[in-house]
Image (cartoon, helix red, strand yellow):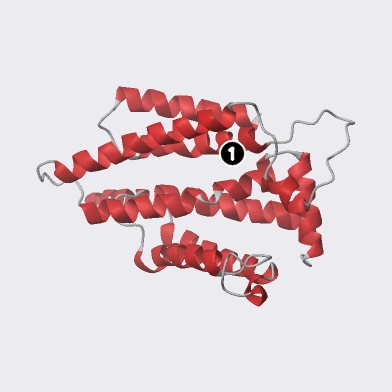
């Protein structure tokens, strides 16, 4: 049901993009985000019939990856490349077009693309927490219990809801400052409760240090401090409110 609902969103986004190829920037994002979730799910989902034993693997392996559907991973890669090229072409047209008040600078697009990327990074996490079915969910419940989280099943669901909220907020630039603050504290808490600070800095250390999460937290925190930039739903809503005033 989740995949069908996401496919419907993708189809609506494609139709909107075909009808308004030079319209707002947000149509390709409405295709990219659900498309990536579908790709993540069907590239890594455990398709085990009811009653069959679950493989004896670590909780992280069961939660984060799986055999998926044959050939779906390369198909997902082609999809991502195609949408990304469209977005980059749209950015190039906007930068090089004559200034008419509707175009944006290279700096505007740099901020936007960075914001979108750090937002979409949450997809690989919340899909396993709340969308990928019982095997990944149970694996994460076991993992959360091992690291001392109270009510581990509820904690997994809460983690997934926070991640999807931050993902959507950063990707579209909606309620960006509070969402980015939430995401920053969430990432730092996850690093702390997961024991990464005690391991050391380098991400290459056994057990994984805090190098990568620190970079991700810093990137998210920047949007809490400085906002989403002009290519965002926040900026669009602010412009409408200013025009109505």
Q: Secondary structure at mark 1?
A: helix
The image quadrant that residue 82 belongs to is: top left
Q: Count numbered badges in the picture.
A: 1
Q: Residue at x 69, y 35 (%)?
A: 67
Front one among 101 and 41: 41
Vertical arrangement, residue 220 with respect to residue 233, above or below: below
Neighbor class of circle 1 (other Cα within 10 Å; few <14, some 14-19, many 20+) is many
Q: Residue at x 62, y 34 (%)?
A: 43
The N terminus is located in which quarter?
top right
User: In this rendering, does residue 59 appear at all?
Assistant: yes
Q: Position of residue 16 (x, y in %)?
A: 37, 27
Q: Residue at x 41, y 47 (%)?
A: 172
Q: Which residue is mark 1?
A: 40
Q: Position of residue 6 (x, y in %)?
A: 55, 31
Front one among 103 and 178: 103
Front one among 243 and 188: 188
Q: Position of residue 2 (x, y in %)?
A: 63, 32
Front one among 202 and 107: 202
User: In this rendering, does residue 151 appear at all?
Assistant: no
The C terminus is located in which quarter?
bottom left
């Amino acid at each position: 049901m989740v995949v069908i609902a996401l496919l419907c969103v993708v189809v609506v986004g494609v139709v909107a993009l075909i009808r308004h190829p030079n319209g707002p920037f947000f149509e390709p994002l409405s295709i990219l985000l659900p498309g990536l979730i579908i790709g993540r799910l069907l590239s890594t989902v455990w398709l085990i019939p009811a009653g069959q034993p679950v493989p004896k693997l670590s909780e992280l392996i069961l939660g984060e990856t799986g055999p998926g559907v044959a050939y779906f991973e390369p198909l997902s890669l082609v999809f991502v490349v195609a949408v990304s090229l469209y977005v980059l072409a749209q950015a190039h047209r906007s930068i090089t077009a004559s200034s008419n008040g509707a175009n944006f600078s290279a700096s505007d697009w740099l901020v936007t693309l960075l914001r979108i990327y750090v937002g979409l990074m949450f997809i690989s996490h919340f899909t396993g927490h709340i969308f990928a079915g019982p095997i990944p969910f149970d694996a994460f419940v076991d993992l959360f219990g091992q690291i001392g989280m109270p009510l581990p099943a509820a904690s997994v669901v809460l983690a997934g809801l926070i991640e999807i909220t931050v993902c959507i907020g950063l990707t579209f630039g909606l309620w960006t400052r509070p969402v980015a603050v939430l995401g920053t504290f969430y990432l730092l808490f996850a690093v702390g409760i997961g024991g990464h600070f005690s391991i050391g800095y380098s991400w290459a250390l056994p057990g994984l240090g805090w190098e990568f999460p620190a970079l991700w937290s810093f990137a998210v925190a920047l949007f809490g401090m400085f906002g989403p930039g002009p290519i965002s739903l926040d900026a669009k809503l602010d412009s409408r409110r200013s025009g109505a005033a």
